[in-house]
Amino acid sequence: MFEKIEFKLKDDIDFERLKGSIVTSYGREPRPILTYYRLGDPEYFRSILPDELPWGSIPPLQVQIAEIRDTVGGHLLPHIDHNISACANYYVTTGDSTTHFYNLKEGGGGFVYPGRQSANIFTLDQVDKVAEFKAKDSDMFLLDVSEIHSVETPKPGIRRFITWQWIGVPFEEVRRSLKQNLK
Ligand SMILES: [Fe+2]
């Protein structure tokens, strides 16, 4: 469901410089507001990357910059990501948050997000928690976002991360292909 990846960016990073145009923004106060940006300054981005990247034979399709502003703190409800099958998140600022993974309970229906074919949002009583992790600032984790997951943040704040995304490639294939897992 997730795996920690050995990866460090160089130096202190200028997060604002990484932000380009907005890809999508959703949520509304007092609920958290999630905003995803295109990479703003690819040359600067390349300059902070380590010499060797952790991807093996299956590199990510794209990278985006994510910022989640939460004026209250609380639980971003269990969901399955749109489109993206796996992502590697480098947490610049975790906001002390914990990521949870769940199995759907028998009969736990879920809700269909407008414009979607199948349920991808769930309430906490529809799911059973099976795993969790708490990243530290500057940690990277590979996540299976095709599984039901949620993020719990204990207090108001901002979460910032850089997210490398795979589309249509199962988490397990990506996980096995990481350099640290190649046999
Ligand atoms: Fe997600």
Image: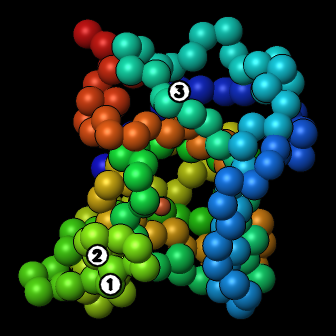
The amino acid pointed to by label 2 is Ala
Taking depth in this image into account, of 11 and 147 the one nearest to the observer is 147
Task: Point out the residue furthest to the front here.
Answer: 115
**To which quarter of the image does residue 86 belong?**
top left
Task: Point out the residue furthest to the left here.
Answer: 106
Q: Earlier in the sequence, mark 2 or mark 1?
A: 1
The amino acid pointed to by label 1 is Phe
Q: CA distance from mark 1 to mark 3?
A: 36 Å
Residue sitting at x 52%, y 57%: 134
Residue position marked by numbered label 3 in the rendering: 6
Residue 74 in sight in this render: yes
Q: Position of residue 159 (x, y in %)?
A: 71, 61
Residue position marked by numbered label 1 in the rendering: 111
What color scheme is it? rainbow
In this rendering, is residue 27 above or below 131?
Answer: below
Q: CA distance from mark 3 to mark 2?
A: 34 Å
Q: CA distance from mark 2 to mark 1?
A: 5 Å
In this rendering, is residue 12 above or below 52?
Answer: below
**To which quarter of the image does residue 20 belong?**
top right
**Which mark identifies residue 94?**
none
In this rendering, is residue 113 above or below 62?
Answer: below
What element does badge 1 sit on?
A: loop
**Which mark identifies residue 119?**
2
Residue sitting at x 51%, y 19%: 54
Q: Do the residues bearing badges 2 and 1 touch, measured as CB atoms within 8 Å?
A: yes
